[in-house]
Image (cartoon, rainbow, N blue to C red):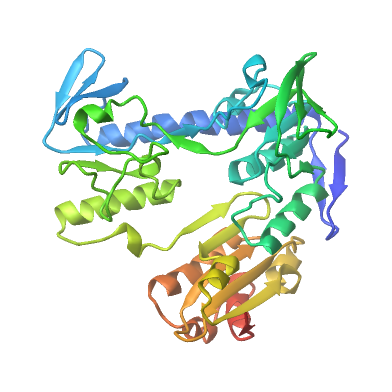
Amino acid sequence: MRLDAVYDTHGVVHLLLPEAEGVGKMNTVRLRWRTLAPLLLAAVLATGCTVVRGHARFQDPHTLRVGDQVLAADRIFLNVGGRAVVPDIPGLADVDYMTNVSILELDTVPDHLVIIGGSYIALEFAQMYRRFGAAVTVIEKGPRLAGREDEDVSATITEILRAEGVEIVVGADDISVAHRGNGVQVSPRAGAAPIDGSHLLLAVGRRPNTDDLALETAGVQTDSRGYITVDDQCRTNVAHIWAMGDCNGRGAFTHTSYNDFEIVAANLLDDDPRRVSDRIPTYALYIDPPLGRAGMTVDQVRATRRRALVGTRPMTRVGRAVEKGESQGFMKIVVDADTDEILGAAILGVGGDEAIHAILDVMSAKAPYTTLARTMHIHPTVSELIPTVLQEMSPL
C-alpha cells in the first residue's frame, strides 16, 4: 500500500492516508460519535430519570409543552446547548454546505474541503481531513488563525498546519460563494483568486439554542446575541429558572457546562456558595500537537498594564517531546511580578492538554509560582520542564 507523506519543519513525517484508509478512519470517527449518545442516555436512564424526547416551549413560567405533553415544575433548569452559526454570505443559499455536525455524516473523503473560519473547530477539522487524505483550504476573515490567542501561538499553529499541506488564506474580509460543477467556488475578497472545492464547511462560531423556547412567555431575559442572562450562580432573572452550558454565554465547552451544574447543585443542595467567577478559563485546541490553555494570554496581561514576568521554552528543549519525535510548539507562562500569582499559560506541544493542569491547579489554589518552580516532577515528562520555565522568568 502506497502512502503519501509530508514533512514538517521539524522533520516529522505525517502520513496521508490513501482514500480507502481515509474512509475507514472517517467511519471509525463517525461510529464513536454515534455510539456516545446512546451510552450517555443509558447512564441517565440508569439514575431513574424520565427522558421526554421532543421540542420544549414555555407555556408560562412554570409550564412547558413537549409535543402533546405538558410538564409543570417548581424549578426548571435549562441546558439546551448551541449550534453552528450560518453567516450571511453572498451565494451561500445556492450551495450545499456542512457544519460541525453534518460533516460527520460524510462517507467519502472530500477531494478538496474548503473551510470558512479559522478558529478551534475549523482547525481541528482541517487537520483531521487533511490526514484522511483530502486537500484542505482554511479561509479566515481576520488577519491570523486562532485570533484570540497570542500572536506567537497563532503563528505556530499556522506553521504546524501548513507543514502538513493545509492551505491557509487570511484577511478574507469579503467572502462570497457560488456553485461550480459538482462543488463550490469561494472568493475570499474582491480581486483575489477564487478557490474551487468539492465540499464546504462552515465553522465561524456558535449560537445558543434559545430562539424557539418561547422564553419571553416565562419572562426569561436574553442578551443581544440570544444568550440567557444569568448571575454568578447560573440563576436567570426568574427566581425558579436556571440556565447552564452553552446557552448562558459563560463558557462553550463540555467542562464549563458540567462546572455550571456543579455550581448550581452546590448552591441548591449543599449550601455551598460556589460561583462562576471563581473558575479560571481553561480549554484546549485539539490539533496535533494540542494547545492547552489556562488563564490570561500575554496580550491580555499587557492590556492590564500590571508588572509581569514571562517564561518560555521551545518543545525542542523538552526531553519527552524530543524522544517521541514530536518537538513542535512551545510552553509559555506569565505571572504577576508583585503577587507572584500565575496569570496564564499556554502549552502548545505534545501532551500540552494534560500538562496544563499542573499550572491550572496552582492557579486555582492561588499559590505563588515559586511553589511550582520548586516542585520536583517525574522524568521524562512534559510537565517536568514547567518548573524550569518558572525558574527562568524575565520581565514582560
Q: In which quarter of the image is residue 24?
A: top right
Residue 281 in sight: yes
- Give percent across and percent down for residue 222: 32, 39
- Give percent across and percent down for residue 228: 32, 40
Q: Considering only vertical position in the picture, is 73 above or below 7?
A: above
Quadrant assignment for the C terminus: bottom right
- Give percent across and percent down for residue 5: 86, 43
**Residue under the image location 78 percent in, 28 percent down:** 112
**Residue under the image location 21 percent in, 44 percent down:** 237
| Drawn side of residue 370 relative to residue 220, left or right | right
| Drawn side of residue 387 relative to residue 275, left or right | right
- Give percent across and percent down for residue 91: 67, 20
Number of numbered discs overlaid on the protein picture? 0
**Residue under the image location 27 percent in, 54 percent down:** 263
Quadrant assignment for the N terminus: top right
| Drawn side of residue 270 relative to residue 129, left or right | left
Which residue sits furthest left?
A: 74
**Residue under the image location 65 percent in, 49 percent down:** 287
As rendered, which of 19 and 222 lies closer to the eye? 222
Residue 349 in sight: no
